[in-house]
Image (cartoon, rainbow, N blue to C red):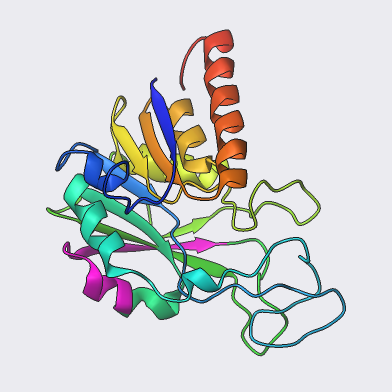
């Protein structure tokens, strides 16, 4: 399957989403910035709303404090189905910005809580499905998906990296073999890896050079594995 990963902002007027035709992708599957501004986490120090006991190696991301409505407009322009990860507090904001109506909310049930200890510690993440018309999943699926997170002791390519099996399930349920899957916030390339493994084409954007380099390596590796072992699943 073919793939392309562009270095740059998905809203760039030349090489971003604007460069591809209306409806040219079959689905957008993406984990965009939540609009909650990730703070650095200091070891042994708990200060502020997003601080914990680990993760000193990632820089703060003030740039993503607000969700840009232009993201929502552009992803709906290029694909009839948009699968969008987000924090439950942001559903109303994202839903209001999306030209398409929301058709489903999937709850990713993680095997551990992923926020510091508190009276109700989050153990889930939301995945919203927006589409121009009613969705037609390719297989039956309930709305709660129990998929383990990447363990804290495992190597992670990106601080918000999603498990490949989770992305594979989304792509398998909502797209057909050969479909073009787009991800305007490609990060370390997990959506693309999942797409290639399932026999879909992939087009992505990543604005940070360090993440883009990692994603390129992962996508190239996924393509090589398919060539060696006889194609997609």
Q: Position of residue 130 (x, y in %)?
A: 24, 59
> Which quadrant holds the N terminus?
top left
Q: Position of residue 97 (x, y in %)?
A: 24, 71
Q: Quadrant of residue 198?
A: top left
Is residue 230 in the magenta section?
A: no
The residue under the point 61% across, 85% down is 120
Examine the rendering and report whether any part of residue 36 can be seen.
yes
The residue under the point 60% across, 23% down is 221
Q: Position of residue 183 (x, y in %)?
A: 39, 45
Is residue 98 in the magenta section?
A: yes
Of residues 59 and 112, the one nearer the viewer is 59
Q: Which residues are magenta?
A: 93-109
User: Is 216 left, or right, of 53 in this rendering?
Assistant: left
The residue under the point 38% across, 49% down is 184
Residue at the extreme front: 14
User: Is 37 left, or right, of 107 in this rendering?
Assistant: right
Q: Quadrant of residue 101?
A: bottom left
Of residues 59 and 24, the one nearer the viewer is 59
Residue 88 vertical position relative to residue 163 in the rendered view, above or below:
below
Q: Position of residue 46 (x, y in %)?
A: 78, 85
User: Is 42 left, or right, of 162 in this rendering?
Assistant: right
The residue under the point 47% across, 44% down is 167
Q: Quadrant of residue 68?
A: bottom left
């Amino acid at each position: 399957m073919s793939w392309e990963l562009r270095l740059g902002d998905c809203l760039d007027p030349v090489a971003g989403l604007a460069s591809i035709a209306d409806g040219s992708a079959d689905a957008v599957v993406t984990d965009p910035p939540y609009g909650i501004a990730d703070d650095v986490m200091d070891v042994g120090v708990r200060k502020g709303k997003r601080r914990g006991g680990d993760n000193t190696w990632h820089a703060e991301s003030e740039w993503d404090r607000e969700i840009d409505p232009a993201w929502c407009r552009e992803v709906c322009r290029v694909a009839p189905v948009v699968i969008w990860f987000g924090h439950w507090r942001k559903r109303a904001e994202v839903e209001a910005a999306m030209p398409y109506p929301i058709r489903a909310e999937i709850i990713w049930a993680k095997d551990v809580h992923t926020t510091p200890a508190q009276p109700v510690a989050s153990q889930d993440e939301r995945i919203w499905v927006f589409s121009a018309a009613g969705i037609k999943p390719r297989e039956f699926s309930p709305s709660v998906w129990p998929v383990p997170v990447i363990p804290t002791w495992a190597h992670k390519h990106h601080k918000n990296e999603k498990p490949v099996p989770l992305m594979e399930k989304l792509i398998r349920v909502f797209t057909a073999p050969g479909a073009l899957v787009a991800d305007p916030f490609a990060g370390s390339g997990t959506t693309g890896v999942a797409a290639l493994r399932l026999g879909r084409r992939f087009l992505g954007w990543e604005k940070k050079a360090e993440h883009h380099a990692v994603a390129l390596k992962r996508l190239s590796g996924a393509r090589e594995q398919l060539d060696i072992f006889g194609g997609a699943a």
